[in-house]
Amino acid sequence: MKIGVVTFPGSNCDYDCYKASRDVLSADTVYLWHGDHDLADVDVVFLPGGFSYGDYLRAGAIASLSPIMQEVRAFAEAGGPVVGICNGFQILCEAGMLPGALIRNRSLKFRSKPVHLRVERSVPPFTSAYAVGQVLRFPIAHGEGCYVAPEDELDRLQAEGLVLFRYCDPGAAVTEAANPNGSVRNIAGITNARGNVLGMMPHPERAVDSLLGSVDGIGVFQSVAEHLVGT
């Protein structure tokens, strides 16, 4: 199993993803430079968090045009798993690989805090290690994390089971008070229709060690690994 982590100018969670995949999964993990056209024969691609290109224009907009994204798109179209975390989620939406958009937080303030998520579906390749309804504790760190989409698109995401995570309180209730950024319907993570591209704002790679306050993020990496072993 070989995992690739893309580094864009301004990425600041690429090492977090690298260390999580290397230490949690003991996987061969490599960095992929945004200006290259080579995915180095990886089995999964992570687009990490950070502030690619300083979030100029819109968060993720410039990075979505980076040369490596041509290869990431082709990889996903061939069925390869792609995970976009925080800025990576923004990049996937800007690249048209996921529906909707991430806009300024409802508070218009940067939010950095632990949040709770409810697992909406337990499916490969990203959430099979969790149980439906399980409550996870992940950190967030973003200024543009409010997920929005047209109502018909939101209805489709719901009907097709493409919402994997929602913001909730510790008791699993999906409430407005538990929503840290104003995302519609408390959406914290979605997949594409094929189910092999995940975008999520919270950071699983920062929840893989008890020293970090949570080990709940391990399940995302384990789910990917189990999927790859089984294919």
Image: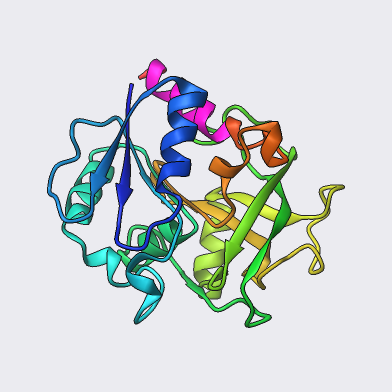
Decide whether residue 222 is among the magenta residues.
Answer: yes
For the point 18% across and 34% down, the residue is 40
Decide whether residue 75 is among the magenta residues.
Answer: no
For the point 12% across and 48% down, the residue is 37
**Which residue appears farthest toward the left when viewing the image?**
37
For the point 19% across and 53% down, the residue is 68
* Residue 212: percent from left, percent from top: 67, 40
**Res 124 seen here:** no
**What secondary structure is the stretch in magenta mostly built from?**
helix
Quadrant containing the C terminus is top left
Horizontally, residue 218 falls left or right of residue 102, namely right
Q: Looking at the image, is 127 positioned above or below residue 71? A: above
* Residue 190: percent from left, percent from top: 52, 53
Q: Which of the pair 81/155 is nearer the observer?
A: 81
Quadrant containing the N terminus is top left
Q: Which region of the structure is painted magenta?
A: 219-229
* Residue 74: percent from left, percent from top: 19, 47
**Res 25 seen here:** yes
Horizontally, residue 170 falls left or right of residue 153, namely right
Q: Looking at the image, is 161 positioned above or below residue 51? A: above
Q: Looking at the image, is 8 positioned above or below residue 26? A: below
Horizontally, residue 42 falls left or right of residue 91, namely left
Question: Residue 54's image quarter?
Answer: bottom left
For the point 40% across and 16% down, the residue is 230
Q: Which of the pair 106/80 is nearer the observer?
A: 106
* Residue 22: percent from left, percent from top: 43, 27
**Which residue appears farthest toward the front when viewing the image?**
211
